Amino acid sequence: MRFVRQFLTALAVYALGGFAVGAVRENDWLMLVVGLAAAACAVLGYAWVVRRTERRPALDVAWEGAAARAGWGTLIGAGMFGAVIVNLFASGHYEVDGLGSVRGALGLVGFMAAAAAMEEVVYRGVLFRVIEEHVGTYVALTLTGVLFGLSHLLNEDATLWGAVAISIEAGFMLAAVYAATRSLWPAIGVHFGWNFAAAGVFSTEVSGNGTNQGLLDAATDGPKLLTGGAFGPEGSVYAVGFGALLTLVFLWLAHRRGNVVPPGARRAARADAAATLPR
């Protein structure tokens, strides 16, 4: 019941937040304000339901150090997507025609903040964390990563390869970020930095949801394997490669910090606790 209540609460906030942001999609200023509000509601709703169902504070969204953790995550996510664009530009598959829209970029700040916060709460805060307790880090990372990729099949220009790419470069990688840090803030930051760089800076398609008008007036053209086609650069082998590399880096960090949960760890902990009880 703990899982059900947390999941339903996160899903409700996700649905309401998504509806609210979608309703103001044509107004950049409203999208900025509503998107940031939806992101805040997602985090606050998660903290509230964890406190109610687990009788403890949600330490993975603690406010202390939140800005720094989210900031570092944003830099990592933006840098990762920037590396994809550098490769596309160097190979002649990304062309900049001039400046785009500052106002459009500001609107995308709100939209991508909402998407990052709401999706991280659902997939990493609830699904990954609870599943990990029962089956361990690696199985939870695989299951939630694949589910995260499959959810992108609902997008307008989705492809099966795009879903596979998202599973590897985002689903697996973001779960590894959470495992390494035990905080949602870096995961939200990486997610936001990646998406905002894609849409708000480089004006590319994001997960098959159409082209965005960000700071640059630019376009991609070339083989789908390199550019991702209509799905966007997230379907590029460059993105998959960088995402897989970061996944390994964060899993190494999780191991080093002792944050990897082996299968059956929760059952073993319960057995140890039971063995210490007076008979």
Image (cartoon, rainbow, N blue to C red):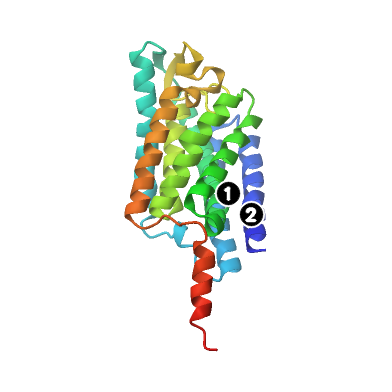
Query: Which element is circle 2 on?
Result: helix
Residue 7 is labelled as 2
- Under mark 2, the amino acid is Phe
Sooner in the amino-acid sequence: mark 2 or mark 1: 2
Q: Quadrant of the C terminus?
A: bottom right
Q: Nearer the viewer, residue 70 or 86?
A: 86
Q: Is residue 272 above or below residue 71?
A: below
Query: Which element is circle 1 on?
Result: helix
Q: Nearer the viewer, residue 278 or 238?
A: 278
- Under mark 1, the amino acid is Val
Q: Is residue 24 visible?
A: no
Q: Residue at x 57, y 39 (%)?
A: 146
Q: Is residue 82 left or right of residue 38?
A: left
Q: Is residue 68 above or below residue 50?
A: above
Q: Position of residue 266 (x, y in %)?
A: 52, 64
Q: Position of residue 82 (x, y in %)?
A: 36, 27
The residues tagged by marks 2 and 1 sit, at their Cα atoms, a distance apart of: 7 Å
Q: Is residue 148 left or right of residue 248?
A: right
Answer few, some or many: residues within 10 Å of disc 2's Cα (few below 14, many 20 plus, some between 14 and 19). many
Q: Is residue 154 visible?
A: yes
Residue 164, picture quadrant: top right
Q: Nearer the viewer, residue 249 or 157?
A: 249
Q: Is residue 196 above or below residue 230?
A: below
Q: Residue at x 43, y 51 (%)?
A: 179
Residue 122 is labelled as 1
Answer few, some or many: residues within 10 Å of disc 1's Cα (few below 14, many 20 plus, some between 14 and 19). many
Q: Position of residue 35 (x, y in %)?
A: 55, 41
Residue 23, picture quadrant: top right
Evaluate if marks 2 and 1 touch, with contact meaning CB atoms under 8 Å apart: yes
